[in-house]
Image: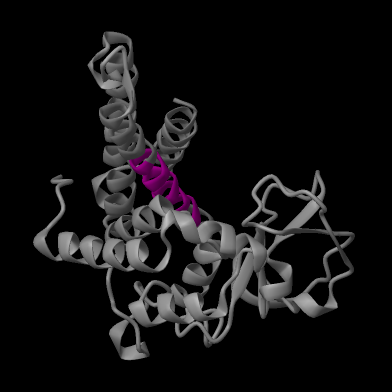
Amino acid sequence: MDFRLTEDQEALRDGVRSFCEGRVPVEALADLEKTGGFDASLWSELAELGVFALRLGEADGGVGLGTADAVVVFAELGRRLVPGPLVWSHLAAGAGLVPGAGTGEVVVGGLDCTAGESGPILVEHLESLHALLVLQRDGVFRVDPKTLDAQAVATPTDPLTPLHHVATLPAGDRVGDADDAARLRLEGAALTSGLLLGIAQETQALAVAYAMEREQFGRPIGSFQSIKHILADMYVRQQIARAAVYAAGATLDDPEVGDVARAISSAKLNAGEAAMKNARA
């Protein structure tokens, strides 16, 4: 299996990267925090770019690409920390579960309850949602966010991701079976791995740039061996994560080449570790 990007995938990556650099520069994150981490105009622009309808069939108004392409796009979104329920809206559109998700008219959030409700129920971006998908072991259920008895979390870990604590979840309307729930869970993990890969890549790029311009003792700190070791470790982590994430996307598109669950677990583990450790470094 060849994990190198095709010319079309490189063009897709460059297009999304150019959009994100112009529309969501690092300086804009503070303004997005003031709006609760959600910008309706940005959301519409992402929809026009094809982010949500990327894997929806062309006959249904989508782009008709695969998960291997989607993880490339989500890595670029992760590089710029683009906020909002990106993964859930993309999943809802790609599976055709929520009309309007692909065009950005309907903002979709979600909860993975396939392991049971053993902890607090926390819903992201609740005030911006039009629909909430809940993955249960026996299927996928759509819940109206306005019916939830929810209380805002005062200090969420991520200021761009507002949280609400929900007391109980209503049953909702069944929109998918157990196989749909299992598939969405895998696809969501792959897309999330893409976001984490982007964080690992961008933090490495920021560190390299800083090491080349910051001087100590009359020379750039990047010339010091200890700094070189840190940067080399960052590079290795993001390269391993990239290979794992690309493999997960390709395996989802063609399950015959390998174990889908194993490939996605590997991607999530490696990308998550790379994002965390590179950010710390």
Per the picture, the main secondary structure of the magenta-coloured stretch is helix
Q: How many marks?
A: 0
Q: Is residue 100 magenta?
A: no
Q: Is residue 191 visible?
A: no
Return the x and y of residue 242 as percentages of the image width and height: 29, 41
Name the outermost residue toward the front. 218
Q: Nearer the viewer, residue 215 or 152?
A: 215
Q: Is residue 74 visible?
A: yes
Which residue is pictured at 34% across the width and 77% down the height? Answer: 49
Left or right, residue 98 beside residue 170: left
Q: With respect to residue 224, does 7 lie above or below? A: below
Give the magenta range.
188-202
Q: Position of residue 281 (x, y in %)?
A: 44, 25
Locate residue 270 relative to residue 119 in the image: left or right.
left
Quadrant for residue 252, please give it: bottom left
Structure colour scheme: one colour
- Residue located at (72% from left, 68% from top): 126
Q: Nearer the viewer, residue 26 or 204?
A: 26
Q: Quadrant of residue 148?
A: bottom right
Q: Quadrant of the N terminus?
A: top left
Locate residue 91, reporting x and y percent. Answer: 49, 68
Q: Quadrant of residue 12?
A: bottom left
User: Residue at horizontal 56%, vertical 82%?
Assistant: 98
Task: Name the foreground residue: 216 vs 252.
Answer: 216
Please tell me which residue is depicted at 46% across the width and 27% down the height of the picture.
Answer: 277
Whether 133 is drawn above or below 273: the answer is below
* Residue 24 drawn at (x, y percent): 43, 63
Magenta residue check for 195:
yes
- Front residue of this view, candidates 137 and 14: 14
273 versus 9 height, above or below: above
